[in-house]
Image (cartoon, grey):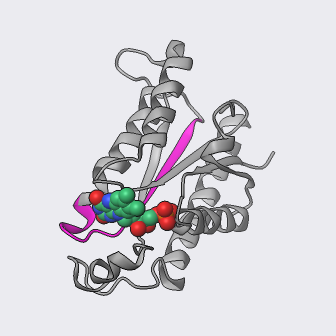
Amino acid sequence: MSLKALVIYFSPGGNTRKVAEAIVRGLERGGAQVTLLPLAEAEDQDYEGYDLVCLGAPSYHFNVPEPVLRYTKSRLSREREKVRLGAPTVPGRWAVVFVTYAGPHTGIDEATPAGDHMAQMFRHLGFEVRGIWYAVGEFHDDRSAENNLYGWLGDIRGRPNEHDLGVIESNAAGLAFVLDHLKRARTS
Ligand SMILES: Cc1cc2nc3c(=O)[nH]c(=O)nc-3n(C[C@H](O)[C@H](O)[C@H](O)COP(=O)(O)O)c2cc1C
């Protein structure tokens, strides 16, 4: 049976959606069967039945945006019976977290709290987190033109670009290949 993956994203401006779609392409290339959902349609989505769950968001004010915070809180309270002291990992439950960020002031350090937050949700639920993936994403509004040119990371116009998305896609393809192998080893 092929690897089943669920990819959930929050993306008001579209950058994180592009990364989510690159992940889908990569996972499918690696043989997985993938469901892609925006966060607004994922509130009641069960994780059961999926080998891999991916959750992505932009960094807002160097953290997860409010809707994502509400989502992680409600998910933990809804699945509170799965939250165990010592966080034992449930075999065959894998997660990946992805974050887009512009990093105008301190670079990737502005994105890691968001990545860590989402990863913590999965770890509390017994998932093995196989990666926290970061991609640079330009600001969209005109007032941010300066931020897209003269921030910590320099010129980030047009990002995530083809190269950024290609890296994410091949990471996802590699991951699907490995997890498929692990799944088959577990179930044979
Ligand atoms: C309200 C708001 C706050 C943001 N705060 C940060 C921040 O603190 N650090 C950062 O690196 N990027 C910040 N950004 C930039 C976004 O994280 C980045 O452009 C992201 O790729 C947007 O994703 P989206 O297009 O999927 O919405 C912010 C963007 C917005 C709109």
Left or right of residue 66: residue 102: left
Residue at 56% over, 72% down: 170
Would residue 14 be counted in the magenta stretch?
A: no
Q: Quadrant of residue 143?
A: bottom left
The quarter of the image that holds ligand 1 is: bottom left
Place of residue 11 in the rendered image (x, y in percent of width and height, measured from the top left): 54, 58
Q: Quadrant of residue 117?
A: top left
Left or right of residue 87: residue 8: right
Place of residue 91 in the rendered image (x, y in percent of width and height, measured from the top left): 56, 31
Would residue 105 be counted in the magenta stretch?
A: yes
Q: Quadrant of residue 188?
A: top right
Residue at 46% over, 84% down: 158
Q: Is residue 134 visible?
A: no
Place of residue 141 in the rendered image (x, y in percent of width and height, measured from the top left): 42, 74
Magenta span: 93-109
Residue extending furthest toward the front: 143
Place of residue 9 in the rendered image (x, y in percent of width and height, measured from the top left): 57, 52
Residue extending furthest toward the right: 1
Q: Quadrant of the N terminus?
A: top right
Residue at 73% over, 56% down: 32
